[in-house]
Amino acid sequence: MATHSVSRRLILSIALACFMRLPAPCLAQENPNTLATEPEIQAADCPPFTTFPQVPITIVVSCEKADSVGVTMPLRADARGQAQQKSVRGRYEYREYRSPRGQQQEFMFDNLMQLAPIAGFTVLYSARPSVITARSGQTWVLIKVDDDSYNISVVRDSQMSCDPVNNAEEVAREMEVRSRVAIYGIQFSPDNQIMEEKSSQSLKAVLKYIGQSPARDLVIESHLVSSKGTKEDDYEITRERAYAVGNKLVAHGIPAELLQAKPFGRMQPLTKSDTPMDIQCNERIELSEARK
């Protein structure tokens, strides 16, 4: 009897030990897709993000929104190799994304670099494979990529203004950071074929900048999004204005072979809004470095 009793206790102990170890694997077997489907759940209360397209096969993990937030945007180094950055403050939105399929960091980065121009953004700085700074008019984007996830901070610059450049230093600063500068305040004759002397302040700043810089090929871009007329009309006006600015620079001693006039009409607006300020910002002359 003693031997039989010991055997029963031994059997019960073994059964209890097995039972205590079984629940976790058994539960996993009952629902094998639990872990696989969990990452597919989109974050609650995060509406579709229309400012910048989403990398395919990613989901929203979190989001934020605020009326006024300041974000420091890294920019490429200046001519002396010094790191540059710009502090942008304004209406703010944030999205964090993750790839349930474990897409690699390089894959994410390459996709985002391709999506930026499609969304109308110009990439101002990038550090492979982790950081991208891009801009479209008043809207700035900072993207940070990490392994199988990335986040986007979008700020609409409330401090942006479309004032004329005041001096050559301002022109040089923009050219160093962006390889281009927007020039406002230029006045044209009614037929748009002559740049009037009323624009002398902007003209003096540009002439001084060119005179202080090594000889380089420059593009004179002309932009306009008018509230009246057709896109063909705007293109013709910008063609005449681009040549008018070029002729004025040549008349002040800039070699014609260094200049290229390029009209854009309404093809590259800084902003798609039609407020008075936006119309003013879209009507501009831009000086840019010619691409080799």
Image (cartoon, rainbow, N blue to C red):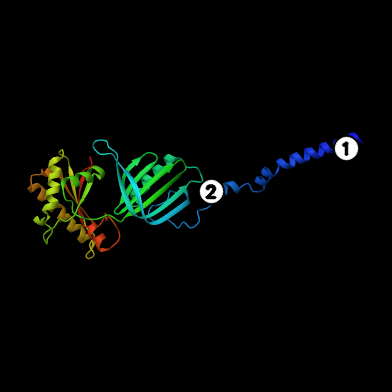
Q: Residue at x 46, y 48 (%)?
A: 97
Q: CA distance from mark 1 to mark 2?
A: 52 Å
Q: Secondary structure at mark 1?
A: helix
- Residue 127, x across and y down, in percent: 35, 39
Q: Residues within 10 Å of mark 1 (few under 14, many from 20)?
A: few
Identify which amino acid the numbered label 1 is placed on: Ser
Q: Which mark is residue 178?
A: none
> Relative to the observer, which residue lies in front, 71 or 108?
71
- Residue 5, x across and y down, in percent: 88, 37
Which residue extends farthest bottom? 228
Can I make out residue 120 in this image? no
The residue pinned by badge 2 equals 39
> Relative to the observer, which residue lies in front, 15 or 170?
170
Q: Residues within 10 Å of mark 2 (few under 14, many from 20)?
A: some
- Residue 84, x across and y down, in percent: 29, 41
Q: Residue at x 48, y 46 (%)?
A: 99
Q: Secondary structure at mark 2?
A: helix
Q: Is residue 175 left or right of residue 131?
A: left
| C-beta proximity under 8 Å, tags 1 and 2 | no
Which residue extends farthest right? 1
Q: Is residue 127 above or below residue 121?
A: above
Q: Is residue 104 left or right of residue 126?
A: right
The residue pinned by badge 1 equals 5
Q: Can you say which quadrant of the picture contains the N terminus?
A: top right
Q: Can you say which quadrant of the picture contains the C terminus?
A: top left
Which of the two discs, 1 and 2, sits closer to the camera?
1
Q: Is residue 146 left or right of residue 15?
A: left
